[in-house]
Amino acid sequence: MTFSALPTFPLRAVFWSVALAALGYLGLSLWAGWREVLAAVVVVGPWVLVGLLSLSLSNYLLRFLRWSRYLALLDAPVAWRINLQVYFSGFALTTSPGKLGELLRSVLLKPHGVPTPASLAAFFAERASDLLSILVLAAVGLLAYAPARPLVGLALAAVVVALLLVQWTALIAAIDHWAARRTQKWARLIVHLCAIVLHFRRCFSLSALAMGLMLGALAWFAEGLGFWWLLGALGHPLPLTTAVFIYAFAMLVGGISFLPGGLGSSEAVMIGLLVINGFPQPVAVSATLICRLATLWFAVALGAIFLARQR
């Protein structure tokens, strides 16, 4: 399979967004000062860095298990080796806005018999489960940081309303019937979206919701735990609940900002909350950059390796 055979996927635009995200991150790193960051890396030491990468890898594998389960629920199971290769390939495009570049998985799975509506439904189920999991982790620190309560509450309300709406079969059927009687392109798009929603709702039965939330919370807690470990290694320990809240809230803001990989917004929140908790600004910036390198950019690097093999 080559990308030239996949004209329906806007790879060029997605790759440009990834490249711009990388340049933006490089600019942020230069602004922070490489000397401070390198000094922080030396203080942390190689074993802590290996531990951070291992916890990030645990995050990716737990989310892969959830993804595999979603495909099975959608009657589209795939051999685990092929599925793992495709799933990790999607990480190469994680820094696209809203992680939409990860929709590449749908293109790569289609030759293996996975219908596009099923893989798209699994993708959106992943995004919803991630959002719920991060909200649960962020809720741990709401008592200590009151300004975050409105944002977390609104995000939680939006997710609950969306999940209730996709369970409203009569409404979906009415919209589908209304759009099917029209010939315009937008009407055909609505028909396809209705098919995706009908698949998506199968991932949110009570048992599937519990499975997705458990695996998602464990996955994102692993990276929050790594962030807590990093802060201690830098000589500025925080309570575990506070560190996990800062990490989860930064990911939440980055996700809803729809910026590539949450670039800029996640970092700003993380740095700001660390400074509020008494960190010197250089230490807060260095901790944030190391954390993002060990989580976001580690995923992008792994994805690039798997995607090169996928070609």
Image: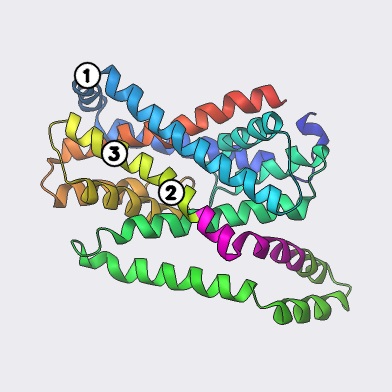
**Lower sequence index among marks 1 and 2:** 1
What residue did someone put label 2 on? 262
Q: Nearer the viewer, residue 287 or 171?
A: 171
Give the CA separation, mark 1 to mark 2: 27 Å
Instruction: Return the x and y of residue 121 as percentages of the image width and height.
Output: 68, 56
The main secondary structure of the magenta stretch is helix
Residue sitting at x 64%, y 51%: 70
The quarter of the displayed image where residue 256 is located: bottom left
Residue sitting at x 58%, y 27%: 304
Q: Amino acid at mark 2?
A: Gly
Mark 1 or 3, which is nearer the eye? Answer: 3
Is the residue 182 above or below the residue 192 in the image? Answer: below
Name the image colouring. Answer: rainbow
What residue did someone put label 1 on? 42
What residue did someone put label 3 on? 227
Q: Secondary structure at mark 1?
A: helix
Residue sitting at x 36%, y 36%: 292
Q: Nearer the viewer, residue 28 or 183?
A: 183
Query: Pointer 2: residues within 10 angstroms few (<14), some, or many (20+)?
Result: many
Q: Amino acid at mark 1?
A: Val
**Lower sequence index among marks 3 and 2:** 3
